[in-house]
Image (cartoon, helix red, strand yellow):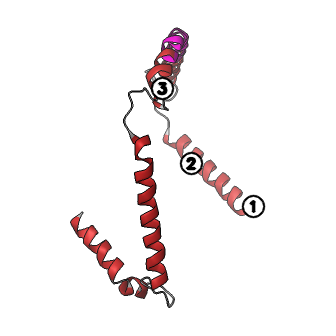
Amino acid sequence: MILFSVLCIGLGLFPAPLYALLPFEVNYAPYSGAHAVSQLQLLLFSGLAFFVMLSFLKRTLTISLDVDWFYRMFAPRLVNLLTPLLAGVITGLESAAASLAQRAGKTLHRHHGPRGNLARTWPTGSMAFWVTTMLLAWLALYYLP
């Protein structure tokens, strides 16, 4: 933090190296009389406003409700209200997923099991035939318009 604060103060006091990095020429004088007076006016009037309004900044014992009310009060009530409904939906989804997984397992076992079509050995001649057929289909799709 000290390094960046020194860098910030240094660039504020000597802005020429920063202006040299810009892609166009800069003719700006930050420390002219008009700039100094306008910044001094801003500083003095903001300080005056602070000290005039200081009595309004006293600490008061109040409860300020803000956006945190939604996650402190509303969200737990909403969760308690929706929990029975969501529990039923989750139970239904779990049973549907279990049923789907069981059917998928049976289908996989039917095709890939010990007596499935994909578990038996295939003759080399039929494999060569299907590879040739697929290559011809690919060539036809690739070269025919």
> Residue 69 — which label?
3
Foreground label between 3 and 1? 3
Q: Residue at x 47, y 79 (%)?
A: 35
Q: Residue at x 67, y 52 (%)?
A: 137
**Residue 53 location, x and y as percent?**
45, 48
User: What is the distance, in whole Å, between disc 3 and disc 1 at their CAs?
Assistant: 67 Å
Task: Residue 115: tell me if it is visible.
Answer: no
Q: Residue at x 43, y 72 (%)?
A: 40
Residue 35 vs 48, above or below: the answer is below
User: What is the distance, in whole Å, between disc 3 and disc 2 at their CAs?
Assistant: 67 Å
> Residue 131 — which label?
2
**Residue 61 location, x and y as percent?**
38, 27
Secondary structure beneath dot 3 equals: helix
> Residue 128 — which label?
none
Among the two numbered marks 3 and 2 on one chain, the one whose residue lies closer to the N terminus:
3
User: Camera-side residue: 130 or 21?
Assistant: 21
Query: What residue would you read off at disc 1?
Result: 144
Among the two numbered marks 2 and 1 on one chain, the one whose residue lies closer to the N terminus:
2
Q: Quadrant of the C terminus?
A: bottom right
User: Camera-side residue: 126 or 66?
Assistant: 66
Q: Residue at x 45, y 60 (%)?
A: 46
User: Camera-side residue: 44 or 114?
Assistant: 44
**Residue 142 location, x and y as percent?**
68, 60
Q: Residues within 10 Å of mark 2 (few under 14, many from 20)?
A: few
The prevailing secondary structure element of the residues shown in magenta is helix
User: What is the distance, in whole Å, between disc 2 and disc 1 at their CAs?
Assistant: 20 Å
Foreground label between 2 and 1? 1
Please name the amino acid that badge 1 sits on. Leu
The span shown in magenta is 78-97
